[in-house]
Image (tube, rainbow, N blue to C red):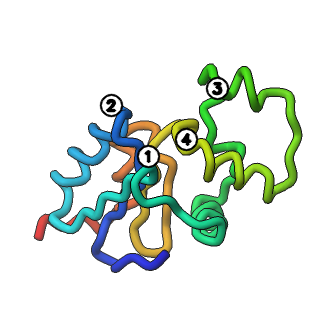
């Protein structure tokens, strides 16, 4: 998953108000925002592995554990790394926040202002 060093890439669920706010906020910071809705354009297992590496997170850490689907179908179960990747790939609606990538850095953006931590000193309004 390559991104240009000046591009902000946002992976998100279009039904999420948090994602819509994050996207709007990103557009105020840069003219180079690429939106990637993972329901329409799914990521491969390899892409998820690369993304988790950039995030420095385990797949389980991306999941909204309060979601009813998680509570009914995932909670209490143990999976290996590949199993957690499959949970994410098949149930992207469980991802708790949009994922924002810029260059070789990525964050799980639970608050739109977290974009600043990703962009620090790199903000451009070109």
Q: Secondary structure at mark 1?
A: loop
- Left or right: residue 66 versus residue 84 is left
Q: Quadrant of residue 101?
A: bottom left
Q: Which residue is tagged 2?
A: 17
Alpha carbon separation for disc pair 1 and 3: 19 Å
Q: Nearer the viewer, residue 60 or 44?
A: 44
Where does the image place residue 40, in percent across and percent down from the top left?
40, 54
| Disc 3 + disc 2, Cβ < 8 Å | no
Q: Which residue is tagged 3?
A: 69
Q: Nearer the viewer, residue 14 or 103?
A: 14
Task: Classify 10 as above or below 73.
Answer: below
Q: Quadrant of residue 56?
A: bottom right
Where does the image place residue 42, in percent across and percent down from the top left?
49, 59
Alpha carbon separation for disc pair 1 and 2: 10 Å
Q: Which residue is tagged 1?
A: 98
Query: Residue at coordinates 62% horizontally, 20% vertically from top-left?
Result: 68
């Amino acid at each position: 998953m390559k991104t240009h060093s000046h591009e902000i890439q946002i992976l998100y669920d279009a039904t999420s108000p948090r994602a819509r706010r994050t996207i709007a906020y990103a557009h105020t910071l840069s003219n180079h925002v690429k939106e990637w809705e993972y329901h329409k354009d799914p990521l491969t297992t390899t892409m998820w592995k690369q993304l988790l590496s950039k995030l420095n997170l385990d797949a389980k850490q991306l999941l909204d554990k309060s979601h009813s689907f998680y509570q009914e179908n995932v909670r209490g179960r143990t999976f290996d790394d590949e199993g957690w990747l499959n949970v994410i790939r098949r149930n992207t609606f469980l991802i708790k926040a949009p994922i924002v990538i810029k260059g070789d850095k990525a964050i799980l953006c639970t608050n739109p202002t977290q974009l600043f931590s990703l962009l620090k000193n790199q903000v451009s309004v070109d």
